[in-house]
Image (cartoon, rainbow, N blue to C red):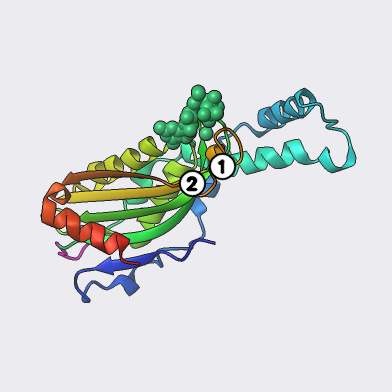
Amino acid sequence: MPHEARTHTHTHDLAAEAFEPPYPDPAPALEAGAGAVDQPRVAAAVRELLLAIGEDPDRDGLQGTPGRVARAYAEMFAGLHQDPAEILGTTFDIGHSEMVLVKDIPFYSTCEHHLVPFHGHAHVGYIPGHDGMVTGLSKLARLVDLFARRPQVQERLTTQIVEAIVEHLKPAGVIVVVECEHLCMSMRGVRKPGAKTVTSAVRGQLRETATRAEAMSLILGR
Ligand SMILES: Nc1nc2c(ncn2[C@@H]2O[C@H](COP(=O)(O)OP(=O)(O)OP(=O)(O)O)[C@@H](O)[C@H]2O)c(=O)[nH]1
Ligand SMILES: [Zn+2]
């Protein structure tokens, strides 16, 4: 199983303890969005799907499956109905102007091509803007989940996280690195279990060679 998210800051005076724990975290925002997936419609479609693959949706083991899948989809696609502004609306003015990085954030997403999972870790770092505003550490992990809980491709997931931070935190720089295994490449198709795809998106000061190298060494130093 994925290891726990860890946090690096340049200075020890950043009172990380004062914030919420970065991960794991109950997700009330997830429940708020769950109602927006049309569960009866999903259940009807799953029943149809079972018939289409040659199964009997009325046999004992499958009777509850359409409803179960509908509830699972409400959770897995809740991010379609959530607004990043609500997550990143909580900011703290602590006058911190050094890099903050939450790394090894585990997540699960769904490949939009095959509707099977892809999963891995996201590393999210930023340098606060001139106003020194930071967000709660857990909010970065929530942001990853928000965009992961949609039909996705890894590249878009990566840039959506970066762009949301740019838009809502107005930071001096942002870096997001995402590493995943795609089950559509493992369990079917080309069948290469263990192959990892790494994507990154970088904005602002973190594009500069030295700052970027520092972020990457923090991300890679396990
Ligand atoms: N760029 C990108 N490609 C992805 C992602 N997830 C899945 N894919 C790829 O999407 C492609 C879809 O290709 P198609 O040829 O339309 O579908 P397919 O016949 O099922 O392809 P195979 O997986 O090669 O069997 C595949 O190459 C997948 O590996 C992703 O997050 N990013
Ligand atoms: Zn796929």
Q: Quadrant of residue 73?
A: top right
Q: Does residue 156 appear left or right of residue 127 in this picture?
A: right
Q: Which mark is residue 31?
A: none
Label 2 Cα neighbours within 10 Å, binned few <14 / some 14-19 / many ≥20: many
Report if the CB atoms under discs 1 and 2 are less than 8 Å apart.
yes
Span colored in magenta? 92-97
Give whichever of 178, 184 is nearer the camera. 184
Front disc: 1 or 2: 1
Instruction: Name the residue at 19% across, 60% down.
Output: 214
Disc 2 is placed on an element classified as strand
Amino acid at dot 2: Glu
Disc 1 is placed on an element classified as helix
Whether label 1 lies within 8 Å of ligand 2 gets the answer no
3 in the magenta segment: no
Give whichever of 20, 141 is nearer the camera. 141
Residue 171 at least partly seen: no
Quarter of the figure with the N terminus? bottom right
Instruction: Name above or below for residue 41 compared with residue 25.
Output: above
Label 1, label 2: how many angstroms apart (C-alpha)?
8 Å
Instruction: Name the residue at 16% across, 63% down.
Output: 98
Q: Which residue is mark 1?
A: 186
The secondary structure that most of the magenta stretch takes on is loop
Instruction: Name the residue at 19% across, 47% down.
Output: 170
Amino acid at dot 1: Ser
Q: Does residue 180 appear left or right of residue 187 in this picture?
A: left
Q: Position of residue 111 (x, y in %)?
A: 51, 36
Q: Position of residue 192 (x, y in %)?
A: 53, 42
Quarter of the figure with the C terminus? bottom left
Q: Which residue is mark 2?
A: 181
Q: Residue furthest bottom?
A: 12
Instruction: Name above or below for residue 153 compared with residue 216.
Output: above
